[in-house]
Amino acid sequence: MPDKTARSSESDIAQNSLAKRPKVDSFDNDASGKELMAATSVTSGSLTRSVKRVSDLNAPIMHLTGHEGEVVSCKFSPNGRNLATASFDRLILLWNAFGAAENHHKLAGHTGAVLQVQWSRDGLHIYSSSADKTVAVWDAVNGERVRKFKGHTSFVNACSASRRGPELVASTGDDGLIFLWDPRQKQHAKKFNDPYPLTSIAFSLDGGSIFAGGIENDIKAWDLRTDNVAYVMAGHDDTITGLCLNADGDKLLSNGLDNTVRIWDVKPFTLTPSRLSKTFEGAPHGFEKNLIRPCWSPDSQFIAAGSGDRSVVVWDVGSSDIVYKLPGHKGCVNDVDWTGSIIVSGSNDKTAFMGELNTSEVK
């Protein structure tokens, strides 16, 4: 673990990082030239207990293979028809989220592991953050990189796209820097400095604030109008590994190395000074200490997170009960995302599972 009293140098972070980090030379330089691979259906070891079909996938479970490194990020497009997965192999793969779940594009250009991907609000572009210290903008239609942002001095762990207001991308990383980028411009729009390495970031619904967390264990809300920290959410006892805002924009989900997933009230005014709403347990990180990121169901009635025990855990927000524990992966599950009745997970086993999850069964 890095010293929490000051930001670590790049070399220190690479050796003593808070979470598992890619080795720059882990993959051959010709990895980007490999053929694309399609998904296959899974008829056993199902990720869902549902019998009734609730999607237009060819099978209730689709196993997505093609990456040559650990899959650390997976995100559905806004319309739910496409999926992007990112990996330590430096690639982003795009898949259909219907039918046979074909892998239709391969986005190559990063020289380090791709640590997170996000979609633009119109679904026409993809944003990625990488261990190569850059943030990239990609054309989701033809797979070409259209812009590369430089400014970070170490691994860029996370990125987030604004949902409303001006189209902006926020990025943060081990250097403790937070950048705001306008995809149409070459230079950053804003820059903030935190004294600790940061691992996760999320825009508020209106685009007027950003939430960032890292090894300090706290989540800070930065007001983009004043360029100051508006408030701090404290409660985790270890590094924040992931943040996710719900659809209504009033609740923030966080995951931490303290093996808890928490919900925070991020409305402008709240009666709870701590802003902590609920705490969930049951998804241990394990010894690998990966950056495990959580997600909301589309209706905000359920939350999900991967775990070090190779499963995806789903909780009912109202009851706080675990309602599903989804098996299938052979390694730590690093990221999950949810669209309609389909949930996806990406894992250290270099694959992703995309499958149906019928929450109407939950009583």
Image (spheres, rainbow, N blue to C red):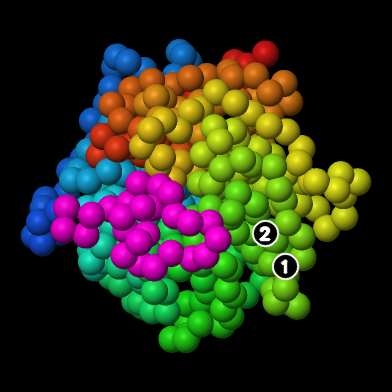
| Disc assigned to residue 23 | none
Evaluate if marks 2 and 1 touch, with contact meaning CB atoms under 8 Å apart.
yes
State which quarter of the image contains the C terminus: top right
Q: Is residue 237 left or right of residue 138?
A: right
Q: Residue at x 59, y 54 (%)?
A: 216
Give the percent coordinates (x, y) of residue 305: 51, 34
Q: Nearer the viewer, residue 88 or 75?
A: 88
Q: Residue at x 87, y 55 (%)?
A: 269
Q: SS for tag 1?
A: strand
Amino acid type of the residue that numbered disc 2 sits on in the rendered structure: Lys
Q: Is residue 142 visible?
A: no
Name of the residue lying farthest toward the right: 271
Task: Read off the residue under disc 2.
Answer: 220
Q: Residues within 10 Å of mark 1 (few under 14, many from 20)?
A: some
Q: Residues within 10 Å of mark 2 (few under 14, many from 20)?
A: many
Give the percent coordinates (x, y) of residue 77: 46, 52
Which region is colored magenta? 1-26
* Label 2 to label 1: alpha-carbon separation: 6 Å
Predominant SS along the magenta part: loop
Give the percent coordinates (x, y) of residue 144: 28, 70
| Disc assigned to residue 229 | 1
> Of the residues under marks 2 and 1, which one precedes in the sequence?
2
Q: Residue at x 60, y 26 (%)?
A: 281
Q: SS for tag 2?
A: strand
